[in-house]
Image (tube, rainbow, N blue to C red):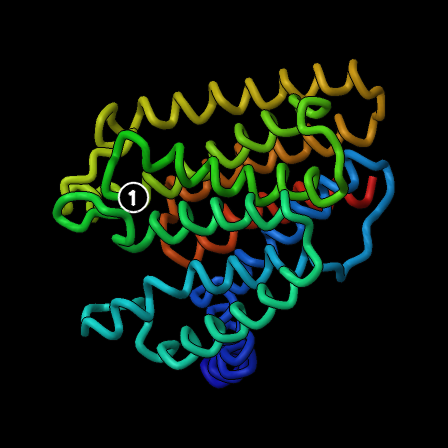
Amino acid sequence: MFSTAHHYFCSVKPLIRFIDLLLYTSVFAALCATALCMATERLISNTTPMVVNSLHLLVLGSTLAVYNTPRIAKMLSRKQAGKREYHNWYIFFFCVGIIIAGTGLYRQTTTMLIACCMLGIVAFSYFLPVLPFKNRKRLRDFGGIKIIVLTGVWTVATSILPILYWQKNIADYPLEITIRFVLVFILCVLFDLRDMQPDLKSSIYTIPNKVGIENSYRLIYATLVLFVILSVLQYFRHPVSGRLVSAAITAAATWLVTQYVKKQPGDRVYLLLVDGVMLLYALLVLLY
């Protein structure tokens, strides 16, 4: 029996290591961001977009570059930067991200280029002290705006950029943008719950550190209800049942994930399941 269990563990170990590689180098997060872009394109055009276009390359590459940058910075400063066995992979995927994003920037409109530059400055400033703040602070060091900045970056990258890319009017899609913001906000609160102790040690007073754990979960549930209400309003504006079903399944999945991570708050669980909510929502929208 022991030998059977050992054989099973050895057989799945390479798969676990591969999954960890995707999670800890932010490849999975980049795929989630790209999928959300495709979902937005589906919502605003009622057609399934091509898997590869310059927008998807831009978002995929930028996410890889931005998320691996702080890990490389910590490596260079000899601080702990995630799992040591992935240090070379951080550099590899950063370089790959730069190349892919650069390819995606080719032939973008002036409006897209301006939006991407502004978004890039904010995104890098979230992880690195590149803005002229005193004491070399990052945007994430300001607990009061940390979640708004991160939620805003993901919302712009996955909903507003696709609207601009297809040269549509942003004002025509207020519910789509708001729904995306609300969904990402919920997931960001969950990640802030995971990071409560490290943030507190760094004097970063996020929502969980200000209102407490239980009130943070109440906020998640209340925002989840808001997500459902907004999705119903979207249905009345665009009576497509697939959209409503996608939102309902996503809301249920988010609630289940929230319950699970309360009991199993490991990094792998967060990176796979919490980020995975975005991928689930995107796939549901693309398949309805």
Q: Nearer the viewer, residue 247 or 75?
A: 75
Position of residue 37 measured from the top left corner of the image (x, y, whole percent): 67, 46
Position of residue 197 measured from the top left corner of the image (x, y, whole percent): 20, 44
155 left or right of 66? right
Instruction: Work out whether residue 107 can be spotted.
Output: yes
Q: Residue at x 53, y 64 (%)?
A: 27
Give the total number of marks visible in the rendering: 1
What is the quadrant of residue 170 in the picture? Answer: top right
Tag 1: Cα neighbours inside 10 Å, few (<14), some, or many (≥20)? many
Q: In the image, is residue 117 above or below residue 196?
A: below
Q: In the image, is residue 277 above or below residue 221?
A: below
Q: Residue at x 68, y 30 (%)?
A: 247
Instruction: Work out whether residue 1 can be spotted.
Output: no
Position of residue 73 measured from the top left corner of the image (x, y, whole percent): 28, 68
Would you name the residue on which mark 1 appears?
140
Q: Nearer the viewer, residue 252 or 226?
A: 226
Amino acid of disc 1: Arg
282 left or right of 119? right
22 left or right of 85? right
Q: Residue at x 48, y 41 (%)?
A: 153
Q: Nearer the viewer, residue 205 or 98?
A: 98
Q: Secondary structure at mark 1?
A: helix
215 left or right of 99? left
Position of residue 104 measured from the top left corner of the image (x, y, whole percent): 65, 62
Q: Residue at x 60, y 55 (%)?
A: 59
The quadrant of the picture occupied by the C terminus is: top right
